[in-house]
Image (cartoon, helix red, strand yellow):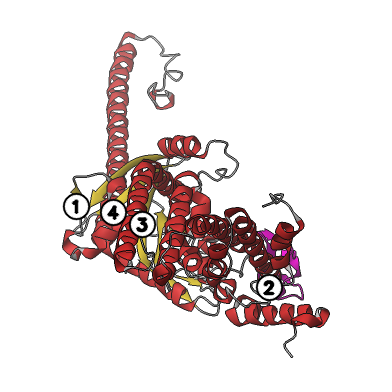
Amino acid sequence: MEKESLFSAKNLKLLTDPLGRSNPVTVLVLGVCSALAVTVKLEPAVVMAISVTVVIAVSSVVMSLLRNTIPNRIRIIVQLVVVSLLVILVDQVLRAFAYDVSKQLSVFVGLIITNCIVMGRIEAFALGNKPWPSFVDGIGNGLGYGLILVVVGFVRELLGSGTLWGYRIIPSSFYIANGGVYENNGLVILPPMALILLGIIIWIQRSRNKNLVES
Amino acid sequence: MNKDSNKYIYLYSTALVVAVAATLSIAATLLKPFQQKNIEVEKKQSILLSVHKAADVRKAKNKRQYVEAEYAKYITDGFVVNSLGEKQEGSAFEVNLEEEAAKPAADRKLPVFVCTDNDGKPKYIIPVRGVGLWGPIWGYVALHSDYSTIYGVVFDHQGETPGLGAELSTPDFQRQFEGKQIFDAASAFTSVKVVKGGHTQGKPHAVDAISGGTITSQGVEKMLMDNLSAYLLFFKEQQRAQEAERRRQEREKKEKEEEEERALLQAKQAEAARIARRAAAEAAAALQSDTTGAAPAVQSENTPVLEQPENL
């Protein structure tokens, strides 16, 4: 068998496809629940995106290494155990060495374990592929998920709080309270607006790529 | 071995679970000291923030050292009181509020931290803990030495919704508490209410609630009410002691003044007696000189009434 290069066209496709054509959130519509919960502000959205990417990539590698030994009937349980182990380890390490980040992240630990994207990629890809392609696939899907989170988080923080990453973007003198004409949009910080934004993103994507439209 | 046989499945799952459990136990044990240290530093930082110290913590190169140094500098004392306001054995820093909340009110240890500021006036820091919408909320309330006016507060939470309830940990929300009072003019306990609709500018016992964070706001109100009211007897006792001290000082001052007045009066009386004596003596002398025939030319210059007493 010919040895495939690490960054062959096929592997690169695994990385870039989830960013657009097979995005886990907008095309597969997975992980929507956490996309609502963490996108009120940009910072938790980015922290969540990074953590999910790490967990998907590492758990894909581990599951891919174990794939030939796992009894088929208990594979979901094995997946759960491995994913939980990784999430708890990540959380514990952050708590010891990056306490400020872990305070942001600890809330979302449960969300990562139950994130359908993690289980979905293990089930659909890592159990049938070698470790390296599984790793690339995990990174790609994590980034695809993160991209949507960041876009939604950007819009919601800007319109809902007038800030980005905690820094004030819309000057406070513009606000009605300070004699201006501007007011933050209260709807944007409520969960339904995340769904509406997600819907708009899906709409734009499908109107540009007719292949995604179901017949 | 057949991968789908029961035996294989049992062995596989047992081995997997044992391996995972061992990994997690080792990780937890190895990382525990680091985590404990982080939690301790975090607590010290929160205490400092409630009295507007450690403001540059984000800029500090070594956060841990910076916080420890600031803490050692400003937080000069910490003690534990009981619900009757009596001081107890034990260190304020070690009290776990979560455990204390489970005990009956009479057995609770109530920690108080004392901050000595640059201006020399002590601030008293009371830790508080309550429940928000999704989980615990906690914080520190720093009181001026009158045990009523709030100097500063800091709140934190475990899992309130970002952008809604989580706003309680922002400076904008916390700044509202500064200058509010937990006792009214008749020194009845009022705590600080968190009310909807704002317009709390001139009100000494209310702050504006968080929009979209109604349950968290109610949680903050209840947390302040519950935790601060536990210290009621301590506050009252301290206020009474301060009032007594103030009275005592006033009384001492008054007594001192009275004494000085009395001394002055005595001095005056003594002086008057001395003058009278001298006048009498001079009158006698004049009488004598009259009898000897010598004119008392200098007598008018020596008129005792004009003489200034040296001790005035």
Q: Report helix, strand or loop for mark 2.
A: helix
Residue B108 visible in the picture: yes
Dot placed on the residue nearer the N-terminal end, 4 or 3: 3
Residue to which mark 4 is pinned: B96
Q: Report helix, strand or loop for mark 3.
A: helix
Please state the chain letter of the residue tagged with numbered disc 1 in the rendered image. B
Residue B156 visible in the picture: no
Q: Position of residue B178 (x, y in %)?
A: 50, 59
Please, is residue B105 above or below residue B212 in the view?
A: above
Same subunit: marks 1 and 3: yes
Q: Report helix, strand or loop for mark 1.
A: loop
| Spatial CA span between label 2 and label 4 | 41 Å
Locate the N terminus of chain B by quadrant: bottom left
Residue placed farthest to the bottom in the image?
A215
Please state the chain letter of the residue tagged with numbered disc 4 in the rendered image. B
What label sits on residue B16 in the rendered view? 3
| Spatial CA span between label 2 and label 3 | 59 Å
Residue to which mark 1 is pinned: B86
Residue placed farthest to the right in the image?
A208
Q: Residue at x 60, y 56 (%)?
A: A135
What are the residue bounds of the magenta stretch? A161-185
As for residue A155 lying within the magenta part, the answer is no
Describe residue B138's horizontal placement relative to residue A108 as left or right: left
Q: Nearer the viewer, residue A168 or A46?
A: A46
- Which residue type does callout 1 highlight? Glu
| Spatial CA span between label 2 and label 1 | 47 Å
Q: Quadrant of residue B11?
A: bottom left
**CB atoms of marks 2 and 3 within 8 Å:** no
Locate the C terminus of chain B by quadrant: top left
